[in-house]
Image (tube, rainbow, N blue to C red):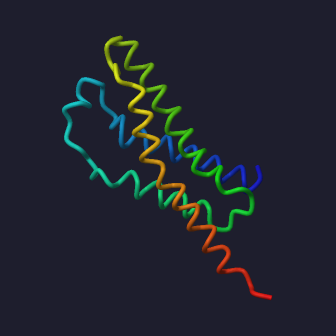
Protein backbone atom coordinates (compact mmCIF):
# COMPACT_ATOMS: atom_id res chain seq x y z
CA UNK A 1 0.00 0.00 0.00
CA UNK A 2 1.12 3.52 -0.70
CA UNK A 3 1.51 6.20 1.94
CA UNK A 4 -1.77 7.74 0.84
CA UNK A 5 -3.63 4.46 1.27
CA UNK A 6 -2.09 3.93 4.70
CA UNK A 7 -3.18 7.36 5.91
CA UNK A 8 -6.71 6.91 4.61
CA UNK A 9 -6.89 3.41 6.13
CA UNK A 10 -5.70 4.86 9.46
CA UNK A 11 -8.42 7.52 9.24
CA UNK A 12 -11.12 4.89 8.62
CA UNK A 13 -9.76 2.72 11.45
CA UNK A 14 -9.66 5.69 13.82
CA UNK A 15 -13.28 6.48 12.95
CA UNK A 16 -14.28 2.91 13.85
CA UNK A 17 -12.36 3.10 17.14
CA UNK A 18 -13.90 6.44 18.07
CA UNK A 19 -17.37 5.02 17.42
CA UNK A 20 -16.63 2.04 19.63
CA UNK A 21 -15.31 4.19 22.46
CA UNK A 22 -17.66 7.17 22.28
CA UNK A 23 -20.97 5.72 21.06
CA UNK A 24 -20.92 1.98 21.64
CA UNK A 25 -19.01 2.10 24.96
CA UNK A 26 -18.74 -1.71 24.73
CA UNK A 27 -22.19 -2.12 26.31
CA UNK A 28 -25.61 -3.31 25.16
CA UNK A 29 -28.13 -0.69 24.06
CA UNK A 30 -30.19 -0.77 27.27
CA UNK A 31 -27.14 -0.20 29.48
CA UNK A 32 -25.56 2.33 27.12
CA UNK A 33 -28.32 4.88 27.64
CA UNK A 34 -27.88 4.96 31.41
CA UNK A 35 -24.13 4.52 31.74
CA UNK A 36 -21.99 7.41 32.93
CA UNK A 37 -19.88 9.15 30.32
CA UNK A 38 -16.34 7.82 30.24
CA UNK A 39 -14.98 10.81 28.38
CA UNK A 40 -15.96 14.49 28.43
CA UNK A 41 -18.18 15.80 25.63
CA UNK A 42 -15.33 17.70 23.98
CA UNK A 43 -13.12 14.60 23.57
CA UNK A 44 -14.54 13.63 20.18
CA UNK A 45 -14.01 16.98 18.39
CA UNK A 46 -10.53 17.30 19.91
CA UNK A 47 -9.63 13.74 18.85
CA UNK A 48 -10.88 14.25 15.29
CA UNK A 49 -9.04 17.59 15.07
CA UNK A 50 -5.83 15.91 16.21
CA UNK A 51 -6.36 13.05 13.77
CA UNK A 52 -6.92 15.42 10.86
CA UNK A 53 -3.81 17.38 11.79
CA UNK A 54 -1.58 14.35 12.38
CA UNK A 55 -2.69 12.46 9.28
CA UNK A 56 -2.56 15.57 7.10
CA UNK A 57 0.97 16.77 7.86
CA UNK A 58 3.24 15.72 5.03
CA UNK A 59 0.38 14.23 3.02
CA UNK A 60 1.05 15.11 -0.62
CA UNK A 61 -2.31 14.10 -2.11
CA UNK A 62 -5.59 15.91 -1.67
CA UNK A 63 -5.96 16.23 2.07
CA UNK A 64 -9.72 16.62 2.06
CA UNK A 65 -10.09 12.84 1.80
CA UNK A 66 -8.71 12.36 5.32
CA UNK A 67 -11.72 13.84 7.18
CA UNK A 68 -14.09 12.12 4.77
CA UNK A 69 -12.39 8.78 5.49
CA UNK A 70 -12.63 9.46 9.23
CA UNK A 71 -16.34 10.22 8.90
CA UNK A 72 -16.88 7.17 6.69
CA UNK A 73 -15.28 4.83 9.23
CA UNK A 74 -17.27 6.37 12.06
CA UNK A 75 -20.54 6.23 10.12
CA UNK A 76 -20.00 2.67 8.89
CA UNK A 77 -19.27 1.44 12.41
CA UNK A 78 -22.33 3.26 13.71
CA UNK A 79 -24.51 1.80 10.96
CA UNK A 80 -23.34 -1.68 11.96
CA UNK A 81 -24.10 -0.87 15.59
CA UNK A 82 -27.61 0.28 14.67
CA UNK A 83 -28.26 -2.90 12.72
CA UNK A 84 -27.04 -5.08 15.59
CA UNK A 85 -29.07 -3.15 18.18
CA UNK A 86 -32.23 -3.25 16.05
CA UNK A 87 -31.93 -7.00 15.56
CA UNK A 88 -32.48 -7.39 19.30
CA UNK A 89 -35.25 -4.79 19.51
CA UNK A 90 -36.58 -2.99 16.42
CA UNK A 91 -37.60 0.04 18.49
CA UNK A 92 -33.97 0.90 19.30
CA UNK A 93 -32.46 3.86 17.45
CA UNK A 94 -35.76 5.46 16.45
CA UNK A 95 -33.89 8.70 15.80
CA UNK A 96 -30.96 7.16 13.93
CA UNK A 97 -30.61 9.95 11.35
CA UNK A 98 -29.72 12.34 14.13
CA UNK A 99 -26.88 10.04 15.16
CA UNK A 100 -25.30 10.61 11.77
CA UNK A 101 -25.80 14.37 12.11
CA UNK A 102 -24.01 14.19 15.48
CA UNK A 103 -21.21 12.18 13.89
CA UNK A 104 -20.91 14.79 11.13
CA UNK A 105 -20.70 17.61 13.66
CA UNK A 106 -18.17 15.77 15.80
CA UNK A 107 -15.93 14.92 12.87
CA UNK A 108 -16.14 18.42 11.38
CA UNK A 109 -13.15 19.34 13.50
CA UNK A 110 -11.06 16.99 11.34
CA UNK A 111 -11.55 19.41 8.44
CA UNK A 112 -10.07 22.18 10.58
CA UNK A 113 -7.15 19.93 11.52
CA UNK A 114 -6.41 19.09 7.89
CA UNK A 115 -6.69 22.76 6.92
CA UNK A 116 -4.15 23.57 9.61
CA UNK A 117 -1.88 20.83 8.24
CA UNK A 118 -1.99 22.56 4.83
CA UNK A 119 -0.82 25.78 6.45
CA UNK A 120 1.94 23.95 8.36
CA UNK A 121 3.15 22.17 5.22
CA UNK A 122 3.24 25.45 3.29
CA UNK A 123 5.21 27.17 6.04
CA UNK A 124 7.76 24.31 6.15
CA UNK A 125 8.52 24.48 2.41
CA UNK A 126 11.76 26.22 1.55
CA UNK A 127 11.28 29.66 0.08
CA UNK A 128 12.90 30.30 -3.31
Q: Is residue 104 above or below residue 98?
A: below
Q: Position of residue 6 (x, y in %)?
A: 68, 52
Query: Who's the residue at 72% across and 54% down the image?
Result: 4
Within the image, what quadrant is residue 83 found in?
top left
Tell me where residue 56 sits by quadrant.
bottom right
Q: Residue furthest bottom?
A: 128
Is 14 situated left or right of 8 in this image?
A: left
The percent position of residue 92, horizontal first and vertical second, equals: 32, 18
Q: Position of residue 88 (x, y in %)?
A: 35, 13
Coordinates of residue 74 in the picture (x, y in percent):
49, 39
Viewer-nearest residue: 127 or 1: 127
Write down the quadrant of residue 123 in the picture: bottom right
Residue at screen point 44% across, 34% down? 100
Depth check, front residue: 107 or 59 = 107
Q: Is residue 21 above or below residue 123?
A: above
At a point 47% along the width and 48% down the height, the residue shown is: 107
Which quarter of the rendering shows the C terminus? bottom right
Residue at 32%, 54% in the rendered image? 42
Q: As drawn, is 36 to the left or to the right of 78?
A: left
Amino acid sequence: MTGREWRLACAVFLGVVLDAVCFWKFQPYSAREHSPELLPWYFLPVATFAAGLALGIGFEAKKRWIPFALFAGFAAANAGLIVMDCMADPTNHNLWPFEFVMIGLATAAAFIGTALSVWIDRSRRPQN
